[in-house]
Amino acid sequence: MANTSSAKKATRVSARRAVINKNRTSRVRTSVRKVEEAIASGNKSVAEAALKAAEPELMRGAQKGVLHKNAASRKVSRLAKRVKAIK
């Protein structure tokens, strides 16, 4: 257990940030899953729409620190490549 008042505050702040980060991570993963489901269904227009919605979520996640910038860019690139390959 924390002894000093600053350590107690750090624990409170950490818990508060963890909830926020969990929410952001969940939003990112949900948006990526929607794109992957659209790709699996084979509907290109739905997949493009899902990708268009997922890209800002991924980049926002990178900006807020729940995902590395290069990882977000890599995910967007790979999803776009898979969407483009749909016939």
Image: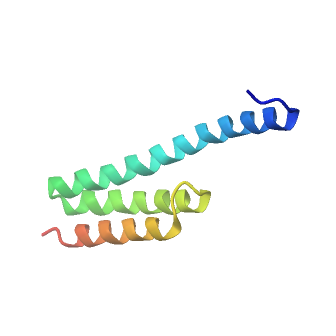
Residue 68 vs residue 76, the one in the foreground: 68
Residue in the image at 82% along x and 29% along y: 3
Q: In the rendered image, which quarter is residue 76 located in?
A: bottom left
Count of all numbered marks drawn on residues in the image: 0
Residue in the image at 59% along x and 37% along y: 19
Q: Position of residue 82 (x, y in %)?
A: 23, 68
* 12 relative position to 65: left or right: right
Q: In the rendered image, which quarter is residue 11 located in?
A: top right
* 37 relative position to 73: left or right: left
Residue in the image at 47% along x and 59% along y: 58
Residue in the image at 45% along x and 51% along y: 28
Name the image quarter holding the N terminus: top right
Q: Position of residue 68 (x, y in %)?
A: 52, 64
Residue found farthest to the top = 1
Residue 36 vs residue 87, the one in the foreground: 36
**Colour scheme employed for the rendering of this structure:** rainbow
Name the image quarter holding the C terminus: bottom left
Residue found farthest to the right = 5
* 78 relative position to 11: left or right: left
Q: In the rendered image, which quarter is residue 74 located in?
A: bottom left
Up-down relation of residue 41 to residue 45 (above or below): above
